[in-house]
Structures are given as structure tokens and as C-alpha cells.
Image (cartoon, rainbow, N blue to C red):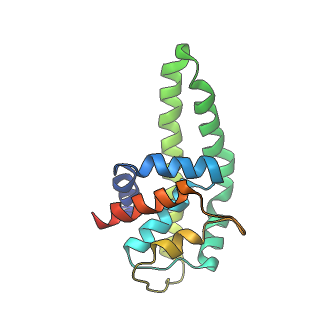
Amino acid sequence: MSNEFWEFSLATYATEGVSDSALAVQDQMGLDINLILYASWLASLELKLTGEHLAGLRHRTERWQKEVVIPLREVRTRLRNDPSAAELRHQVKAIELSSEKHQQELMWSYFNAADSLPRGVQSLGENLALLLPPGAIPTPSWAMMEDKLFRASSG
């Protein structure tokens, strides 16, 4: 079965400015890029993310992300400043991407098994806002990311 979410993520992430702005938000606010892409994908389908759906999705993927994706990212980041480990860093980056794809497969299967989400035209901002930690104030990087995602979905 084709994973439409993964295909959307690849295309969106490759859009100019999306990856840089999403990485900045990930680094500054500790948010998962896969959740950002998921909220964007739902908006592209004119679906509204709900708190209940997000909680179930996090429950389904949180352990994988914490135990596999984040440690791989940390290893790749540590290798960044070691020119003698460039090939190893490249290999870790490929494994990290595979681990993120697996996380998105978990998300895709959750989406297909979950209750239907409400319809919502122009729900990108609302969907993304649900990802913010309680009391968090959107940063300039957040606004830039939201703008880049909106442009990617409009283009």
C-alpha cells in the first residue's frame, strides 16, 4: 500500500525554505518535524487535527521517536565536526531517514485505523497550533515555517 503521507512529506520538505524553517523550529522548540508534516498533510486534505487524534498518534509513535530517531539524530550531529567521519555521518544520516520513514509508516497506519477527522478548509494554522506545548509562544521561526508550509501547499 502506498503511503501518501510519506510522499507528501518528501515533496513538501523539498520545497524551498521548508526544511530550514522546520529544522529551526525543531531545534528551538523541540517539536517533531514528522508531526509538523503530519499536521500539514491533514490540512492539505482539508482535515482538522484534534487533540484526541494527536494524543493517540503520539502514543503510537513517541517511543520509536525517543528511542530510535532522536538518538540517531544526536549521533549524526556529533559526527558533523569530525571530517574523518564524513562517510560514517552519511551512513547514519541514511539510517536516520529510514527511521523517520518508519515513524511515518506508524503515523500512516494510525491515520488509516483512527476515527475520521472533521473537515476544515484552511486548517493549517489550527493544526500546527495544536503541536505547540501549553503556554508556548510562537517564535519568528515558527511564523516563517508556517508561511513556508502554506506556500508549499498553495504552490
Which residue reaches farthest front? 140
Name which residue lies at 48% across and 43% down.
97
Q: Is residue 127 visible?
A: yes
Which residue reaches farthest bottom? 118
Displayed quadrant of residue 61? bottom right
Position of the N terminus, as image quadrant, is bottom left
Name which residue lies at 49% across and 44% down.
98
Position of the C terminus, as image quadrant, is bottom left
Name which residue lies at 47% across and 73% down.
112
42 vs 16, left or right, is: right
Q: Position of residue 39 (x, y in %)?
A: 50, 68
Name which residue lies at 68% across and 64% down.
136
Which residue reaches farthest right? 135
In this rendered view, identify the residue nearer to me: 113 or 87: 87
Q: Is residue 1 visible?
A: no
Q: Position of residue 149 (x, y in %)?
A: 41, 61
Q: Position of residue 137 (x, y in %)?
A: 65, 64
11 vs 116, left or right, is: left
Q: As displayed, is residue 8 above or below residue 111?
A: above
Q: Position of residue 142 (x, y in %)?
A: 54, 58
Displayed quadrant of residue 74? top right
